[in-house]
Amino acid sequence: MKRIGLKLAILAMVASTVATVPALAGESAAVRNCTWCHGAEAQGYTVAPRLAGQQPQYIMSQIQSFHEHTRDNPFSRQYMWSAVAALSPAAARDLANYLASIPPKPANDGDSALASKGKRIFMEGIPEANIVSCYACHGPNGEGVRDIPRLGGLAYFYVKARLEQWGQGYHSTAGSPMPLVASHLGPDEIEALASYLSYVK
Ligand code: HEC
Ligand code: HEC
């Protein structure tokens, strides 16, 4: 009984924290519709990834794929399909530009012992295992460009889940190279890459 009571108390606390994430000065109601899940300053919160500093064109391409239901992994279905259902293209563009302008903070939550292995794979790939270098598209610090996302500093569990889900057949943006890229990655490589990326500034 005690344990159940404690769990409920924690749930109530979490629920009230989410409802009272302090608004940024000048943060509009439209932005608060996103940050109550994506965290204060859009730095990410539990399963909702950081959006701060993300490439604006990438944010817009993902909003479109949530709209079209092509990004179909469980959390996208559960949370994002409805979150963008009523968003106009102009509102999506304004949100993307605003979120991209917030300085991103690294999650620093991976296994630091795996970071150097992850960095090596990120920079050089593993040619004999058909694993391409990520750097070629995502840039030396995983900063991304246009519709290629910033990866540096994203949370370990988020990056790990994305890389696993492509291998499980979940889809993303139409024409994305990632299902093929990820299909060559084993669990050890995914853990190393996600660990490394969580520390990149
Ligand atoms: C109810 C919670 C919730 C709300 C509200 C919400 N999101 Fe999300 N969002 C999520 C979750 C969870 C994910 C992760 C989906 C996954 O695991 O692939 C996500 C993913 C995203 C992504 C993909 C990020 C990436 O790196 O690929 C974008 C872009 C996004 N949300 C934008 C928004 C915008 C803009 C709003 C406000 C209009 C918003 N979200 C509101 C929970 C939410
Ligand atoms: C040929 C270019 C290319 C290469 C090489 C590439 N990527 Fe990507 N990556 C993309 C594009 C484009 C997207 C956005 C489209 C999408 O979401 O499917 C993306 C998306 C991602 C995402 C989703 C980020 C988010 O915010 O949800 C992750 C994680 C990722 N790539 C990791 C990697 C890793 C790790 C490697 C190296 C093993 C790699 N990528 C190699 C082009 C590339």
Image (tube, helix red, strand yellow):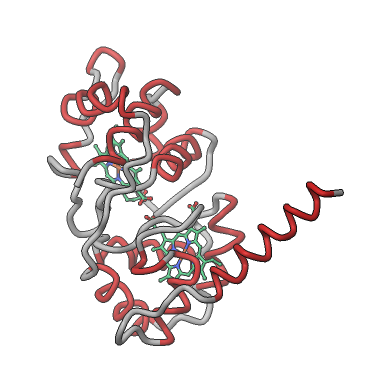
Q: Position of residue 125 (x, y in %)?
A: 22, 24
The image quadrant in which ligand 2 is located: top left
Residue most toward the left?
Answer: 140
Residue most toward the top?
Answer: 128
**In the image: residue 197, left or right of residue 48:** left
**In the image: residue 186, left or right of residue 122:** right
Up/down of 135 relative to 188, above or below = below
Give the quarter of the image for residue 65.
bottom left
Up/down of 91 relative to 112, above or below = below
The residue drawn where x is 68% and y is 65% is 12
Up/down of 173 relative to 124, above or below = below
The residue drawn where x is 31% and y is 29% is 112
Up/down of 32 relative to 161, above or below = below
Residue most toward the right?
Answer: 1
Give the quarter of the image for residue 88.
bottom left
The residue drawn where x is 56% and y is 75% is 19
Q: Where is residue 75 in the image (x, y as percent from the top left)?
A: 56, 54
- Which sits in the foreground, 178 or 124? 124
**In the image: residue 56, left or right of residue 166:** left
The residue drawn where x is 38% and y is 46% is 155
The number of callouts visible is 0
Give the quarter of the image for residue 81.
bottom right
- Which sits in the foreground, 9 or 141? 9
Q: Position of residue 70 (x, y in %)?
A: 49, 57
